[in-house]
Amino acid sequence: MLISNNVLAQGGGAPESQSFHQVIKDKFIEGDPLWMSPILLCFIFGLAIVIERILTIIAAQGNSSSILNAVVEHLREGKVASALTYLEGKSDYFSEFARTVVSNFSREIDVIEKEAESRAGLMVSRLESGLPWITLFISLSPLLGFLGTVVGMVMAFDAIAKANTISPAIVAHG
């Protein structure tokens, strides 16, 4: 027994450092899976929406500089129909915006500007879709955490009332 105490005193029996995954798993279990599962679901859904939005924005960027150069070249040569044909084959946001501008190329500048603003507004609203869900999950997760805290406090006070005394052992469970 004396040897094992010496080993423990020297740090030989201390538990090895846990991996990040194990620490997270332990904290999840400590927090009671019943209360932690909705928070985990909010995290997963929110993360999925964020990843989808990032991929959508990356795809929306496209190769705008080369498209712009090609369209400007067509327009300098006076080939509006050729520029529209070139843009029809593209499906990114910049091409859609350029198609709106080029299709109204023969009209007055005010009309072109209004059409461009209208199209840009529609494109931005499509890019912003899903953001209210992220806001919901950002707001909901802390509230679920606070709900677990309140339930724990209620359990602690209930245990104090039942025991009719205050002791750290009684309060520790809640």
Image (tube, rainbow, N blue to C red):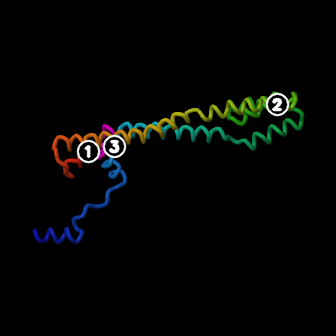
Identify the residue under disc 2.
Answer: 112
101 lies above or below 145: above
Report the front residue among 61 and 120: 120
Query: Between tags 3 and 2, which lies in front?
Result: 3
- Secondary structure, mark 3, is helix
Is 79 part of what is drawn in magenta?
no
Magenta region = 29-35
Splitting the image into 4 quarters, where does residue 155 fall? top left
Mark 3 vs 2, N-terminal side: 2
For mark 2, does the 10 Å Cα neighbourhood hold few (<14), some (14 to 19), or many (20 or more) residues?
A: some
Q: Position of residue 162 (x, y in %)?
A: 17, 40
Kind of residue sitting beneath label 1: Gly
Label at residue 149: 3
Location of the N terminus (image quadrant):
bottom left
Q: Is residue 129 left or right of residue 11?
A: right
Kind of residue sitting beneath label 3: Thr
Mark 2 vs 1, N-terminal side: 2
Report the front residue among 136 and 118: 136
Identify the residue under disc 1.
Answer: 174
Report the front residue among 146 and 18: 146
